[in-house]
Amino acid sequence: MDMLLEPWHWFVLGIVLILFELFLTTFAVLWFGIAAVMVSILVWIYPDMSTTLQVISWTLLSILCTFLWFKFIKPLSKDKITNHLSRESVIGQVGLVIQLQIDNNIQVRFPMPLLGSDEWFCRCSQNVHVGDKVKVIDISGNILVVEPYPL
């Protein structure tokens, strides 16, 4: 005799897997949890679905969710992070002066991380004030060289 799993079984499994993902932070089990919640909806709509079909549905939906993540969603995040990009990709980036230092050194916050950080100590040959926009024109060691933007 085939034991039918109830929709709440799949729902609880899905929520547990999704919550487990909070501790892993690797997106490894999230897709299995989402698929389990989707199977709970399917079992709720089609209550006579066999356990074998439920497991097959869960497997296929897990594969589909994982595929969709790598195909469509993950590539969207690559455009917003400039970590490990070349020097040329950093030059021209515009940021906001958040703090003035001594000797024309300033701290600038960029809207997206540049080379792994969104705040940089920069050197500017011209006087700028907190709140001014600056543009990267060069990199000198660990310091970005900037100029006021727009000129």
Image: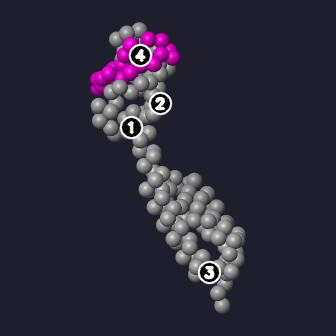
Tell me: 115 left or right of 54.
Answer: left
Quarter occupied by the C terminus: top left
Query: Which region shows up in magenta?
Result: 128-151
Tell me if I can see residue 142 in this picture: no
Q: Residue at x 38, y 21 (%)?
A: 135
The disc label shown at residue 111, or none: 2
- Label 2: few (<14), some (14–19) or many (≥20) C-alpha neighbours in 10 Å: few
In front of the other: 126 or 16: 126
For marks 3 and 2, the one nearer the N-term is 3
2 or 4: tag closer to the N-terminus: 2
Crowd tier of the residue under label 4, counting other residues whose Cα lies within 10 Å: few below 14, some 14–19, many 20 or above: few
Callout 2–callout 4 Cβ contact below 8 Å: no
Is disc 3 surrounded by few (<14), some (14 to 19) or many (20+) residues within 10 Å? some
User: How much space separates mark 1 and mark 3, taking CA atoms?
Assistant: 46 Å
Q: Amino acid at mark 3?
A: Thr
> Label 1 sits on what residue type?
Thr
Give the amino acid type for the residue marked by disc 2 in the picture: Pro
Cα–Cα span, label 4 and label 1: 22 Å
Residue, disc 1? 82
Of label 1 and label 3, which has the lower sequence position? 3
Mark 1, secondary structure of its residue: loop
**Callout 4 touching callout 1 (CB < 8 Å):** no
At 43% from the left and 56% from the top, the residue drawn is: 71
Give the left or right position of residue 130, taking residue 42 as reference. Answer: left
User: Residue 121, image x and y in percent?
Assistant: 40, 23
Q: Is residue 145 magenta?
A: yes
- Who comes first in sequence, dot 2 or dot 1? 1
Q: Position of 74 compared to 136: left or right?
A: right
Instruction: Kindly identify which residue carries mark 3.
Output: 51
